[in-house]
Image: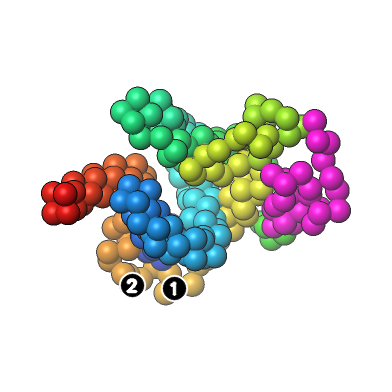
Protein backbone atom coordinates (compact mmCIF):
# COMPACT_ATOMS: atom_id res chain seq x y z
CA UNK A 1 0.00 0.00 0.00
CA UNK A 2 1.11 3.55 -0.75
CA UNK A 3 1.40 5.78 2.37
CA UNK A 4 -1.90 7.44 1.43
CA UNK A 5 -3.60 4.02 1.40
CA UNK A 6 -3.52 3.55 -2.38
CA UNK A 7 -2.63 0.01 -3.43
CA UNK A 8 0.18 -0.67 -5.90
CA UNK A 9 -2.05 -2.46 -8.39
CA UNK A 10 0.78 -3.45 -10.73
CA UNK A 11 2.27 -5.78 -8.11
CA UNK A 12 -1.00 -7.72 -7.84
CA UNK A 13 -1.37 -7.81 -11.63
CA UNK A 14 2.15 -9.07 -12.31
CA UNK A 15 1.89 -11.69 -9.56
CA UNK A 16 -1.45 -12.79 -11.01
CA UNK A 17 0.10 -13.01 -14.48
CA UNK A 18 2.88 -15.23 -13.11
CA UNK A 19 0.34 -17.51 -11.40
CA UNK A 20 -1.77 -17.82 -14.58
CA UNK A 21 1.36 -18.59 -16.61
CA UNK A 22 2.25 -21.31 -14.10
CA UNK A 23 -1.27 -22.75 -14.28
CA UNK A 24 -1.17 -22.92 -18.09
CA UNK A 25 2.29 -24.48 -17.99
CA UNK A 26 1.26 -27.14 -15.45
CA UNK A 27 -1.86 -27.92 -17.48
CA UNK A 28 0.26 -29.19 -20.36
CA UNK A 29 2.35 -31.29 -17.96
CA UNK A 30 -0.82 -32.85 -16.53
CA UNK A 31 -2.06 -33.59 -20.04
CA UNK A 32 1.04 -35.74 -20.45
CA UNK A 33 1.14 -37.10 -16.89
CA UNK A 34 -2.55 -37.92 -16.39
CA UNK A 35 -3.90 -38.38 -19.91
CA UNK A 36 -0.74 -39.99 -21.26
CA UNK A 37 -0.63 -37.68 -24.29
CA UNK A 38 2.98 -37.04 -25.27
CA UNK A 39 2.21 -33.71 -26.93
CA UNK A 40 1.43 -32.33 -23.47
CA UNK A 41 5.01 -33.02 -22.37
CA UNK A 42 6.29 -31.55 -25.64
CA UNK A 43 4.47 -28.24 -25.15
CA UNK A 44 5.44 -28.20 -21.47
CA UNK A 45 9.13 -28.60 -22.34
CA UNK A 46 9.00 -25.85 -24.98
CA UNK A 47 7.39 -23.43 -22.51
CA UNK A 48 10.12 -24.11 -19.94
CA UNK A 49 12.23 -21.45 -21.65
CA UNK A 50 9.82 -18.83 -20.25
CA UNK A 51 9.84 -20.20 -16.70
CA UNK A 52 12.73 -18.15 -15.29
CA UNK A 53 11.01 -14.90 -16.30
CA UNK A 54 7.87 -15.69 -14.32
CA UNK A 55 9.87 -17.11 -11.42
CA UNK A 56 11.77 -13.83 -11.23
CA UNK A 57 8.58 -11.76 -11.36
CA UNK A 58 6.93 -13.76 -8.59
CA UNK A 59 9.93 -13.91 -6.26
CA UNK A 60 10.92 -10.24 -6.67
CA UNK A 61 7.35 -9.12 -6.01
CA UNK A 62 7.24 -11.32 -2.91
CA UNK A 63 10.43 -9.62 -1.76
CA UNK A 64 8.94 -6.18 -2.36
CA UNK A 65 5.83 -7.14 -0.40
CA UNK A 66 7.96 -8.33 2.52
CA UNK A 67 8.98 -4.69 2.94
CA UNK A 68 5.31 -3.69 3.05
CA UNK A 69 4.07 -6.46 5.35
CA UNK A 70 3.12 -5.64 8.93
CA UNK A 71 4.54 -8.97 10.11
CA UNK A 72 6.88 -10.69 7.65
CA UNK A 73 7.77 -13.44 10.14
CA UNK A 74 4.14 -14.44 10.66
CA UNK A 75 3.48 -14.32 6.93
CA UNK A 76 6.56 -16.44 6.30
CA UNK A 77 5.47 -19.04 8.85
CA UNK A 78 2.06 -19.34 7.15
CA UNK A 79 3.58 -19.75 3.68
CA UNK A 80 6.21 -22.21 4.93
CA UNK A 81 3.43 -24.20 6.61
CA UNK A 82 1.53 -24.25 3.32
CA UNK A 83 4.67 -25.55 1.62
CA UNK A 84 4.97 -28.35 4.16
CA UNK A 85 1.31 -29.19 3.53
CA UNK A 86 2.04 -29.50 -0.19
CA UNK A 87 4.91 -31.88 0.60
CA UNK A 88 2.66 -33.95 2.89
CA UNK A 89 -0.03 -34.27 0.22
CA UNK A 90 2.26 -34.98 -2.75
CA UNK A 91 4.89 -37.13 -1.04
CA UNK A 92 2.79 -39.05 1.49
CA UNK A 93 -0.93 -38.99 0.67
CA UNK A 94 -0.89 -39.09 -3.15
CA UNK A 95 1.42 -42.15 -3.40
CA UNK A 96 -0.92 -44.02 -1.06
CA UNK A 97 -3.76 -43.58 -3.60
CA UNK A 98 -1.59 -44.58 -6.54
CA UNK A 99 -0.40 -41.18 -7.79
CA UNK A 100 3.39 -41.21 -7.91
CA UNK A 101 5.99 -39.03 -9.59
CA UNK A 102 4.47 -35.73 -8.41
CA UNK A 103 6.29 -35.46 -5.07
CA UNK A 104 7.30 -31.92 -4.12
CA UNK A 105 10.17 -31.26 -1.73
CA UNK A 106 11.01 -27.65 -0.94
CA UNK A 107 8.84 -26.16 -3.67
CA UNK A 108 8.11 -22.50 -4.28
CA UNK A 109 6.00 -22.07 -1.12
CA UNK A 110 8.64 -23.61 1.15
CA UNK A 111 11.31 -21.42 -0.43
CA UNK A 112 9.24 -18.24 -0.19
CA UNK A 113 8.25 -18.97 3.40
CA UNK A 114 11.87 -19.51 4.42
CA UNK A 115 12.91 -16.35 2.52
CA UNK A 116 10.25 -14.32 4.34
CA UNK A 117 11.39 -15.59 7.73
CA UNK A 118 15.06 -14.90 6.99
CA UNK A 119 14.22 -11.45 5.58
CA UNK A 120 12.01 -10.68 8.57
CA UNK A 121 14.83 -11.50 10.97
CA UNK A 122 17.28 -9.38 8.94
CA UNK A 123 14.82 -6.51 8.31
CA UNK A 124 16.46 -4.06 10.78
CA UNK A 125 19.74 -4.43 8.85
CA UNK A 126 17.99 -4.26 5.48
CA UNK A 127 16.28 -1.00 6.43
CA UNK A 128 19.60 0.57 7.49
CA UNK A 129 21.45 -0.40 4.31
CA UNK A 130 21.36 1.77 1.18
CA UNK A 131 18.76 0.10 -0.98
CA UNK A 132 20.73 0.54 -4.23
CA UNK A 133 23.80 -1.10 -2.70
CA UNK A 134 21.61 -3.88 -1.31
CA UNK A 135 20.07 -4.52 -4.74
CA UNK A 136 23.52 -4.59 -6.35
CA UNK A 137 24.93 -7.05 -3.78
CA UNK A 138 21.84 -9.28 -3.99
CA UNK A 139 21.96 -9.39 -7.80
CA UNK A 140 25.68 -10.24 -7.69
CA UNK A 141 25.21 -13.03 -5.15
CA UNK A 142 22.33 -14.47 -7.19
CA UNK A 143 24.47 -14.51 -10.32
CA UNK A 144 27.56 -16.08 -8.75
CA UNK A 145 25.62 -18.81 -6.88
CA UNK A 146 23.14 -19.67 -9.64
CA UNK A 147 24.93 -22.90 -10.58
CA UNK A 148 25.22 -24.29 -7.06
CA UNK A 149 23.08 -27.33 -7.90
CA UNK A 150 25.62 -28.31 -10.57
CA UNK A 151 28.47 -28.18 -8.07
CA UNK A 152 29.95 -24.97 -9.46
CA UNK A 153 29.63 -21.32 -8.47
CA UNK A 154 31.19 -18.01 -9.52
CA UNK A 155 30.17 -18.56 -13.16
CA UNK A 156 31.61 -22.08 -13.13
CA UNK A 157 35.05 -21.01 -11.96
CA UNK A 158 34.83 -22.46 -8.43
CA UNK A 159 34.02 -26.15 -8.06
CA UNK A 160 32.49 -27.19 -4.75
CA UNK A 161 33.60 -30.41 -2.96
CA UNK A 162 31.94 -33.48 -4.49
CA UNK A 163 31.36 -34.87 -0.97
CA UNK A 164 28.65 -32.26 -0.45
CA UNK A 165 26.58 -33.83 -3.22
CA UNK A 166 26.44 -37.36 -1.81
CA UNK A 167 23.48 -36.61 0.47
CA UNK A 168 20.17 -34.77 0.30
CA UNK A 169 20.36 -33.19 3.75
CA UNK A 170 21.48 -29.87 2.23
CA UNK A 171 18.72 -29.95 -0.39
CA UNK A 172 17.08 -26.70 0.89
CA UNK A 173 20.36 -24.92 0.07
CA UNK A 174 20.56 -26.24 -3.50
CA UNK A 175 22.98 -29.08 -2.73
CA UNK A 176 21.68 -32.61 -3.36
CA UNK A 177 22.67 -36.02 -4.72
CA UNK A 178 21.69 -37.65 -8.02
CA UNK A 179 18.86 -39.49 -6.23
CA UNK A 180 16.94 -36.30 -5.44
CA UNK A 181 13.75 -35.64 -7.42
CA UNK A 182 11.05 -33.05 -6.92
CA UNK A 183 8.22 -31.94 -9.21
CA UNK A 184 8.67 -28.37 -7.96
CA UNK A 185 11.91 -27.20 -6.39
CA UNK A 186 13.31 -23.80 -5.41
CA UNK A 187 16.47 -23.83 -3.31
CA UNK A 188 17.29 -21.00 -0.93
CA UNK A 189 20.51 -20.52 -2.85
CA UNK A 190 20.31 -18.67 -5.20
CA UNK A 191 16.62 -17.64 -4.89
CA UNK A 192 17.02 -16.01 -1.46
CA UNK A 193 19.19 -13.37 -3.12
CA UNK A 194 16.52 -12.60 -5.72
CA UNK A 195 14.01 -12.29 -2.87
CA UNK A 196 16.37 -9.88 -1.07
CA UNK A 197 16.74 -7.91 -4.30
CA UNK A 198 12.98 -7.37 -4.13
CA UNK A 199 13.13 -6.53 -0.43
CA UNK A 200 15.65 -3.76 -1.07
CA UNK A 201 13.62 -2.51 -4.05
CA UNK A 202 10.63 -2.52 -1.71
CA UNK A 203 11.96 0.65 -0.06
CA UNK A 204 10.61 2.60 -3.03
CA UNK A 205 7.23 0.92 -2.60
CA UNK A 206 7.23 1.64 1.13
CA UNK A 207 8.09 5.29 0.49
CA UNK A 208 5.37 5.62 -2.16
CA UNK A 209 8.03 6.37 -4.76
CA UNK A 210 6.90 4.00 -7.50
CA UNK A 211 5.72 5.65 -10.76
CA UNK A 212 2.16 6.89 -10.58
CA UNK A 213 0.93 4.47 -13.25
CA UNK A 214 1.81 1.48 -11.03
CA UNK A 215 -0.99 2.51 -8.66
CA UNK A 216 -3.61 2.41 -11.41
CA UNK A 217 -5.74 -0.60 -12.37
CA UNK A 218 -4.90 -2.28 -15.67
CA UNK A 219 -6.13 -5.91 -15.49
CA UNK A 220 -8.68 -6.70 -12.79
CA UNK A 221 -8.63 -10.47 -13.43
CA UNK A 222 -4.87 -10.72 -12.96
CA UNK A 223 -5.09 -8.46 -9.91
CA UNK A 224 -7.69 -10.77 -8.33
CA UNK A 225 -5.49 -13.81 -8.91
CA UNK A 226 -2.47 -11.94 -7.58
CA UNK A 227 -4.22 -10.94 -4.35
CA UNK A 228 -5.21 -14.57 -3.77
CA UNK A 229 -2.05 -16.19 -5.15
CA UNK A 230 -1.54 -18.58 -2.21
CA UNK A 231 -5.02 -20.07 -2.59
CA UNK A 232 -4.71 -20.33 -6.37
CA UNK A 233 -1.38 -22.12 -5.99
CA UNK A 234 -2.74 -24.57 -3.41
CA UNK A 235 -5.89 -25.29 -5.41
CA UNK A 236 -4.63 -25.37 -8.98
CA UNK A 237 -3.14 -28.88 -9.04
CA UNK A 238 -6.02 -30.64 -7.25
CA UNK A 239 -8.43 -28.90 -9.67
CA UNK A 240 -6.29 -29.78 -12.69
CA UNK A 241 -5.96 -33.40 -11.55
CA UNK A 242 -9.72 -33.58 -11.03
CA UNK A 243 -10.43 -32.20 -14.50
CA UNK A 244 -7.82 -34.42 -16.16
CA UNK A 245 -9.05 -37.60 -14.45
CA UNK A 246 -12.63 -36.70 -15.42
CA UNK A 247 -11.52 -36.26 -19.04
CA UNK A 248 -9.60 -39.54 -18.82
CA UNK A 249 -12.72 -41.34 -17.56
CA UNK A 250 -14.87 -39.84 -20.33
CA UNK A 251 -12.27 -40.87 -22.94
CA UNK A 252 -12.31 -44.39 -21.47
CA UNK A 253 -16.10 -44.59 -21.77
CA UNK A 254 -16.02 -43.33 -25.36
CA UNK A 255 -13.18 -45.49 -26.69
CA UNK A 256 -13.51 -48.68 -24.61
Tell me, yes or no, whether the highlighted magenta stretch contains residue 129: no
Q: Is residue 203 left or right of residue 170?
A: left
Colouring style: rainbow
What residue is drawn where x is 59% and y is 58%? Answer: 201
The disc placed on residue 165 is: none
Residue at 17 percent across and 54 percent down: it is 255
Q: Is residue 154 magenta?
A: yes
Front residue of 25 and 58: 25
Q: Quadrant of residue 118?
A: top right
The span picked out in magenta is 137-163
Q: Is residue 83 visible?
A: no
Residue 216 is situated, as x and y percent measured from the top left of the image, at 35, 71
Near-viewer residue (27 or 189): 27
Pick out the residue farthest to the left. Answer: 253
Disc on the earlier residue, 2 or 1: 1
Q: Which mark is residue 212?
A: 1
> Crowdedness of circle 1 by 10 Å Cα count: few (<14), some, many (20+)?
few
Q: Nearer the viewer, mark 2 or mark 1?
A: 2
Q: Residue at x 43, y 69 (%)?
A: 214
**Mark 2 surroundings: few (<14), some (14-19) or many (≥20) residues within 10 A:** few
Q: CA distance from mark 2 to mark 1?
A: 13 Å
Q: What percent of the width, then of the height, locates residue 236?
A: 31, 48
Which secondary structure lies at badge 1?
Answer: helix
Q: Secondary structure at mark 2?
A: loop
Q: Nearer the viewer, residue 256 or 28?
A: 256
Residue annotated with mark 2: 218
Q: Is residue 220 visible?
A: yes
Instruction: Classify residue 160 as left or right of residue 69.
Output: right
Q: Count the numbered circles shown.
A: 2
Residue 130 point in image, percent of width and height: 70, 55
Q: Residue at x 70, y 52 (%)?
A: 146
Amino acid sequence: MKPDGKRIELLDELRGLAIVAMLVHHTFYDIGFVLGLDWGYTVFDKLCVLQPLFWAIFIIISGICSRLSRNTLRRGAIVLGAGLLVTLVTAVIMPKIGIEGAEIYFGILSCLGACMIITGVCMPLIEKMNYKLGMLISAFLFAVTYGISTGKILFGIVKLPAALYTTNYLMPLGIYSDSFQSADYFALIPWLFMFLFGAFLGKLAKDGAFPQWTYQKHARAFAFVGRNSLWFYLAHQPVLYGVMYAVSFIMYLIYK
